[in-house]
Amino acid sequence: EQFLDTAEGHFRYPELDENDPLGMCYTSGTTGRPKGVVYTHRSTILHSFGIALPDALSLSMHDVFTPVVPMFHVNAWGLPYAAVMTGTKQVHPGPYLDAENLLDLYERERVTATAGVPTIWLGILQALEKEPDRWKLVPGMRMVVGGSAAPESMIRAFDKFNLRVIHAWGMTETSPLGTVSLLKPHLLELDEDAQYAYRAKQGIPVPLVEVRAMTDEGEAPWDGKTMGELQVRGAWVAASYYNLPSETDKWTPDGWFRTGDVVTIDAEGYVKITDRTKDLIKSGGEWISSQDLENAIMSHPAVAEAAVIAVPHPKWAERPLAAVVLREGEQLSADELRAYLEPKFAKWWLPDAIVFVDEIPRTSTGKFMKAKLREQFKDWKWE
């Protein structure tokens, strides 16, 4: 309030062209050098309209929103702009991102919606499970999760506290919101397990965004089984990188952005990410999804988080190695974890190596740094 009082009361906004740049953010650099993406006033306003819609993040003047995302990460996912547009009260956590401080903030400010990466929500969940009666949160508080996939087990666990996890997907190049996983009315008639399976997907595209999955043979059918690279285009999807005019391989000749995510799209139009192209494991000529393995491992009650990578193998070319962080006070052996996974996957999918670690390296935006793990375990000795 003191800062606002320093402004003169007769401030007038300058006249700007809608295509003038509003801001720029850089990609996380997990696949190479970070690249700048410029957002215009037009793209940002359209993105704000899109994410505020009732069937997207549903922001209004009745909401209190806390983005647990830094502004350098895609302008805090564009949420501050959408909040200003809709009159939503914003409550920012500043540097206090630990679970207890966030939960205190949610309780004190009566937060109705929040957004962040799975790492943040994992800490929140552990705090709630440790002291389930300590915080009185707004019932049904919406928790938007993006940046990486949240396992179905996490979505189920938060439901027990009457907190609703909403899966979303996006990238720096998409401003970022591309899809949101809300259930269509007729899907609410499905059994509980089927509903959770839909909620664990990345969802359907928001208005003004188109999606398709492409294989070497062309566009993949929307059958929920055929995998292809996710490509997107829309009103707020970038058409180039800043000062990199020669960097054109990320866009198709007909104007679609190549995301690098491997997905399926089902008959309802729900996108499910199975992996990043660089993270798929090719073992004996067959593909293994590291993300499917990670989600299954993290559904074990003793596991806090897990990352699965490909490690060179003399016979099979690559085999999966799982780096696993256990919950505080829990014990679990590699054989016990492998036995837990056996009913869920074909035998050749199971990780041949399971390594228990204190932590998994992450980027500043909360994503696993799998390149660092691959470097760490590149000389793994197979027995």
Image (spheres, grey):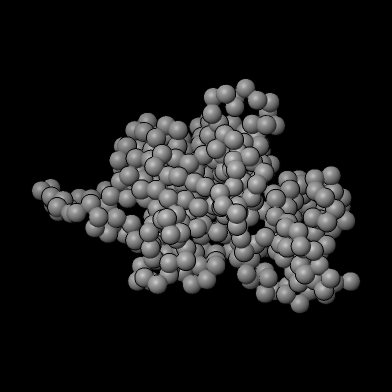
**Above or below for 120 versus 265:** below
- Horizontal and vertical percent position of residue 316: 81, 67
Q: In which quadrant of the rendered view does residue 359 lie?
A: bottom right
Whole-percent x, y for residue 122 in the image: 62, 49
Q: Residue furthest front?
A: 217
Q: Residue at x 14, y 53 (%)?
A: 14
Measured along the vertical axis of the image, is residue 374 above or below residue 328? below
Q: Nearer the viewer, residue 349 or 309?
A: 349
Return the x and y of residue 165 as percentages of the image width and height. 56, 39
* Residue 113 visible to the viewer: yes
Residue nearest the observer in this picture, 166 or 223: 223
Q: Depth check: 361 or 236 in front?
A: 236
Count of picture labels:
0
Q: Is residue 88 left or right of residue 278?
A: left
- The quadrant of the image that shows the C terminus is bottom right
Work out whether 89 lies above or below 42.
above
The answer to whether any part of residue 83 appears in the image is: no
**Residue at x 85%, y 48% (from the top left corner):** 342
Percent coordinates x, y for residue 237 in the rendering: 40, 53
* Residue situated furthest left in the rendering: 10
| Displayed quadrant of residue 373 | bottom right
User: What residue do we see at 45% from left, 37% from top?
Assistant: 56
In this rendered view, identify the residue nearer to me: 269 or 368.
269
Residue shown at the point (76%, 59%) measured from the top left: 286
Q: Left or right of 362: which side holds 256?
A: left
